[in-house]
Amino acid sequence: MSSAPFRNARGTRDLLPQDLVLVRHLERVAQKVASAASYREVRTPMFEETRLFQRSLGETSDVVSKEMFSVPKRGTEGAELNLADGYTFRPENTASIARAYVQGGFAASAPLQKWFYVGPMFRYERPQKGRERQFSQFGVEAFGPQSPTLDAEVVGVALQFFHALGFDDQLQVRVNSMGDPEDRAIWSEELRKFFADQFAGESTERCPDCVVRFERNVFRLLDCKVPRCVERNEGAPDLFSVMGDDAKRHHQEFGQALRAIGFEPVEDRSIVRGLDYYSRTVFEVHYPPLGARSALCGGGRYDGLVEEMGGRPTPGVGFSIGFTPTELALKELGLPHAADLQDLEDGLMPQVYAIGIGEEDRLELFRLVTELRQAGIRCELDHRGKSPKAQFQEAAKSGARFALVLGAEEREAKQIVLKDLAAKEERKVGQDEVLTLLHQGLGE
């Protein structure tokens, strides 16, 4: 009885060699720009205790209420099954990074820490273009000072990432402030008063998501993109009308710091965060030529998160960039350029293709190839028993710069034929000379 072939789970994708060329490029650029600003890489587990995300993101957030992949602890079953007591595959990484910061004792021993990460996240949501259930993110997190210039530095790293990928000066930084907790408490009441009539009675012209948001997180009403809801947000109370002087000053100095490094911020009061840990600075990086999909990155300040994780009060700020929407944006813009992609492909191609003339030459050839690989030379050889003619054809298709040819005569004399496939030149050399000559020929 035959069965249907297995397929990858919905909302996931296989990254095949041709896909990984671009993904590896994104990873290398991320590492380069973060390291240039003295951010060091950290790697947290891909799953945490569920209560970590409930505590940090908030029970009413969309992520916690309907988007987490959670599993129970082993040994719980039946009536005792409680996912809240189990584990969750990380839907984002800031909470995990803060947990690691607290657990490592950095708040007491070395409060200033600048970290970056690249890795997979998991959210149970409806898969669509640019949204997957498993997706990779690049992010930075900086702990220690509550500094507007540190906020601007974080934004600068994000902008440098996109510039390095080929985005031009049309990149735009949109900024807002979530104020301090006491500011948000006052603002929340003002918003509820303003929106109360829109949700009174059994019917409302707001979208279903806004109905839920009004009860759970009133700030998220301002983030709705449904046109009729956007219209009904006009005239809503502004947080800046109730914000304290310290938070206002921080926001002003953040803008000044951005201008100092050459970026004019765009004030955007619609940028709010549905996660409980955000405070003061929030921002997004946009590329307007992309139209409705212009948002490339989001981030902000979360000064209460470390304390929420059980540590000393320690300010923090960061951002995250999703690789999937970045890949889509690059494709739409025709980036990276074909020549750049070819350079990436070339870095994966063999530099040398080894050819055995007779069956008895193959073992000696395999030994030589292994030595070259151990010395850092990318080598390939035939494992399928192909004829010498077919091996030469494979060498030509492989993109290798050189071919090594071993026959009975060369094997007996401890020599090998070194053939420059580009120049179409060849010569016999001693096997003990091959590594040095290849390094010279490859410019290494």
Image: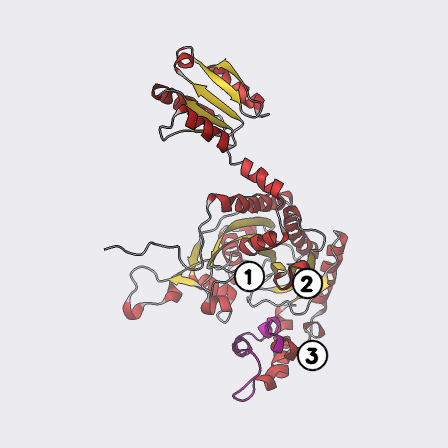
Q: Name above or below for residue 146 compared with residue 425.
A: below
The local secondary structure at tag 2 comes to strand
* Magenta stretch: includes residue 211: yes
Among numbered discs 1 and 2, the one appearing first in the sequence: 2
Which residue is painted at 71% across and 55% down in the image? 170
- The residue labelled by disc 2 is 175
Q: In front: mark 1 or mark 3?
A: 3
Q: Is residue 234 visible?
A: yes
Distance between the Cα atoms at labels 1 and 3?
Answer: 31 Å
Q: Name above or below for residue 430 compared with residue 201.
A: above
Image coords of residue 57 (percent x, y): 51, 65
Image coords of residue 313 (percent x, y): 58, 60
Q: Name above or below for residue 413 compared with residue 300.
A: above
Among numbered discs 1 and 3, the one appearing first in the sequence: 3
Amino acid type, callout 3: Gly
Q: In the image shown, does 365 or 212 lie closer to the viewer?
A: 365
Q: Residues within 10 Å of mark 3 (few under 14, many from 20)?
A: few
Q: In front: mark 1 or mark 2?
A: 2
User: Quadrant location of the N terminus?
Assistant: bottom left
Is the C-beta separation of discs 1 and 3 under 8 Å?
A: no
Q: In the image shown, does 46 or 190 lie closer to the viewer?
A: 46
Distance between the Cα atoms at labels 1 and 2?
Answer: 21 Å
Write down the region rendered in magenta.
Answer: 200-228
Q: Which mark is residue 305?
A: 1
Q: Which mark is residue 235?
A: 3
Q: Residues within 10 Å of mark 2 (few under 14, many from 20)?
A: many
